[in-house]
Image (cartoon, coloured by chain):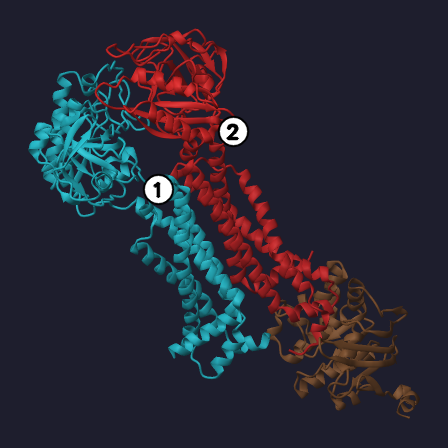
Amino acid sequence: MELRPIVSALMRHKTGTLLVALQIAVTLAIIVNGLFIINKRIEKINRPYGINVDSIITVSVRGFGEDFDSGASLREDMDLLRNLPGVVAATSINQIPLSGSGSSTGLRSVPDETATSTSATIYNTDEYGLTTLETALIEGRDFYPEEVEYSVPGQAQRDIPPVVLVTKALADKLYPDGDALGRPLYWPSMEPSTIVGIIGHMMGSWPDWHAINNSVFQPRTRNNFRYLIKAEPGARDSLVPVIEEQLAELNRQRLVRSVTTHEDVVTRTYEADRAMANILIAIIVLLVGLTSLVIVGLASYFVSQRIKQIGTRRALGATQIDILRYFLVENWIITTVGAFAGCLLTVAVSYLLETNFDLPRLDYSYLLVCVIALWLISQFSALFPARRASAVPPAVATRTV
Amino acid sequence: MMQMKGITKIYRTDVVETRALTELSLTIDAGEFVAVTGPSGSGKTTFLNIAGLLENFESGSYHLGDQDVSQLKDRESARIRNEKIGFIFQSFNLIPDLNLFDNVDVPLRYRGFNSRQRRERIEQALHTVGLHSRIKHLPSQLSGGQQQRVAIARALAGDPLFLLADEPTGNLDSTMAGQVLELLEQINEDGTTVVMVTHDPDLAARAGRNIQLLDGAVTNDPKDLPEAVAAYA
Amino acid sequence: MFSYDIWNALRSMRRNPILTSLMVAAIAVGIGVSISMLSVYHIMASNPIPHKSDQLFRVTLDSWGPLRPYDDSDPMKTPIQITYREATALMRTGEASRQSAMFETGLVVEPDSPDLIPFETRARAAFSDFFYLFDVPFLYGGPWDKLADDEAAQVVVLTPAINNKLFGGRDSVGEKILMSGRTFTVTGVIDRWEPMPRYYDTRNGPFQLVNEIFIPFTLTPRMELWSHASSSNWKAEKIQNHAEWLNSEAVWIQYWAELKSDLEVQAYQDHLDNYAREQKKVGRFQRPINNRIFNVTDWLDYREVVPNEVKVLVALGFLFLVVCLLSSVALLLTKFDGRSMEVSLRRALGASRSALLGQHLMEVMVIGFVGGLLGIGLTQLCLLAIEAMISQAPEYMLRMDWQMIAAAVVIAIVTSVIAGLFPAWRSCVTDPAQALKTQ
């Protein structure tokens, strides 16, 4: 309603006004791009694992000495672990899911080296693998105990297991028609294994990998130097030292390298993502805090500079609400100019981030949300000085300086 | 038109209690040109603030026209100030960031006139004070006398019940002061009531009626002579 | 005059404590955020061996299979590691003043002392040239000799940590250690050595500490050493034993050479290409000849060791600094604006325009100085916070070196002068009469 006189008053203080608007613009550019990155990280961290990470303990062992029998050692360890009170299930595995390290291969649905292969994480485990991970089959069956290969001294390794389990993501990649069960998959050596079961969902080892959801399970424990132990609810943390001690005592021919919770392993894997999100959150909080403080500071200053003018306006018939509105509208104009410039700047910054640092394209709905948030924050910040202005008594007008 | 009865105003701080007005009573009729005088500390400014509804008072009553304006809420007193009172301040109180048009426009905005009405009134008022040609100028581009004439235009534009002037020539040299006073006299002749607070006896002498204040009460009002004598007795 | 300026500056800061502390806070926070991001970047992107980074070359060969390139997104990219076959051939025939093949493995140390239980350590199999290539500092002893390389002697160079654990930190040269069932003789203990990034093996943790002991590469076949780090293979090979592994097409070895002139570089490149041509004759190297060598800085760029995340954070950190700068300018502008009366008065009392400018600038400098100091403290806090969030980060990766402290100071002063110059100048050129009139 009184936009034009406010604008012309602002135009008399162009530099200060433009500076605040510019600050709001840059703030918007940082907040929008920052929030977008944060959200992408949170989405990444929150993807379902398909594993009950919270109840699992992980162990790494390493045999040494000339006459170390890894097969026998493994069986002894498994016997010990499975009979420990508080343990629900235990298995050996070649790599710990979501640990950031492991091995992968390329698989095909046809025995043709020139056909495009599908990348997948390789898990070697026994018939207790899925139970321990709490990863559910949606089709087919689990491994039979007799299908699992153990290492026997002097006996050569079997080439390729006759049966495998695959995740649904991998099954759908190999057989897009959804009829993967019972069909073969071909290893890089062009030897086939039959898919006997399909796992609903489970993540592999590297969260950044494009094929994170593709995994293949072999019934094999040879060279499995890692154990997964599923604890009863509440028993996990007290089991960790027990396992460490009892395994170490059982066999002095192998080292127990690390006994830790799977939760810790996964937390470490996502550490950089979490750090990135936290740093950005801190930057945004500081930024919003600083910008609102500057708005409060400048508006307070303007109010104190205009006490006489406010008194005059009051004497000439302005109500307290009129004065409050005057300062809020003034703030709104500055914020809006800033937000408009900020939109352009945001697009420019996001374009630079996208082209230089391989960031995904900005989702522009963030811009809308942030502009609205900025309006609210800015108005809220201006409210305090504006209230002070509205409390200026009209009798100020008759006071001589 | 303006009627004050037994108005008492007390200023309180934590330690001191000052009686600024004591049982002040006076009546001003439509069309008068009244000067309110008195030495400093006599309650002139308090009278001005109360007459202009800029401050509340402890006891007594105040009527403007046929309306009791003694105890109004902020919103109501703002409306009365806006519609019925035209303020003229010693230091002009123009808004430095606004040009003449926008300065005169300030009270009209709060009045809620539409833009055509406002434009007509502003132009008319600036015409009356002879500054129509400088409508786009900023206050800082004018002399003190011109600034005060703009303030008068601002006071007139809303067609008030009366003009309330606070030492209108206090910040001006004698030539400019003379011009401003002539303007006020002319406005009065055109029918607008003028109440002027001043400490300058020469200025007061030019008013139709001179009310003297001392220690927060009327000591000499030609209109209420008997009462004043009675007070002295 | 100088002390009068300072006095005026402090007085003026006291008069507007909220605006002043806001300005100080804005500068401090801006510096804290931007410099802590820059510090992380600075360390990650630093040249780990500046005096010879242009003479050390990482050697890569395109030994990949015929069907598809090593990297589908860029067919010109060579595998970053090489096979055991190429490693041994190059060690035999390559003409460089120094060169070494190397890979990371693990050994189980079985201490003599009954108090110590066996433990596993990371170990790097390399040639004696490794220590000369990378100027590895020694605390005790030194590298093994060339003869030990040739004979695959059981010798070892320890890290200070392992030397402390096994020998209480004393000079252990000549001592014996049982590792993975074999007795090794200590020839040396390296001193604190922190190449950052750990450029010689970027594939396996470029920002990890050097926490590996060193043994001769030539022990690989006899001890059946496997790579404990990444390996990849284009060929579907059935690898049943260690000999087959060494003979496979799997790439798992890093290779570095020291080449002192462009001539030597060219000669080495020619040698690689000739080698590839020879191999083509026996059916290997079926892709177009594409062998690439990189000096240290090129290699770090090629491997993109500085994560994009860090670059994004630096960019946003400096945008943040821009916001702080804008805040300061806006705050100062209003502050000086409100002082136009005083300026007019001082001008009237005989202060020259430049004297007033000096007075305002002094105030700005004081604010910048205090803000900068707080900013350096804040940077340390930010780095501590980042360190707390990233357990894998070595502590020295997140510290401010003197360059960063200098950068913080310079940025603080430049920021505050930029922030203050315009407002100070503007308030000083204001027409005094104008200022008085509008009051």
Please give the residue where the numbered disc 1 appears in the rendered image: C393
Q: Residue at x 6, y 32 (%)?
A: C147
Hue used for the chain lettered C = cyan
C270 over A317 or under it: above or below = above
Q: Which mark is residue A189?
A: none
Pick whichever, C410 or A163, lies toward us: A163
Q: Chain of mark 1?
A: C
Spot the brown chain and give its letter: B
Q: Calculate the distance from the C-alpha at mark 2 to the C-alpha at mark 1.
A: 32 Å
The amino acid sitting under disc 1 is Ala
Q: Quadrant of residue B138?
A: bottom right
B226 over C352 or under it: above or below = below
Category of crowding for the residue at label 1, using alpha-carbon neighbours closer than 10 angstroms: few (below 14), some (14–19), many (at least 20): some
| Proximity of marks 2 and 1: CB atoms separated by less than 8 Å | no
Category of crowding for the residue at label 2, using alpha-carbon neighbours closer than 10 angstroms: few (below 14), some (14–19), many (at least 20): few
The amino acid sitting under disc 2 is Gly
Residue A120 in sight from this viewpoint:
no
Q: Secondary structure at mark 2?
A: loop
Please give the residue where the numbered disc 2 appears in the rendered image: A234
Mark 2 or mark 1, whichever is nearer to me: 2
Pick whichever, C71 or C17, lies toward us: C17
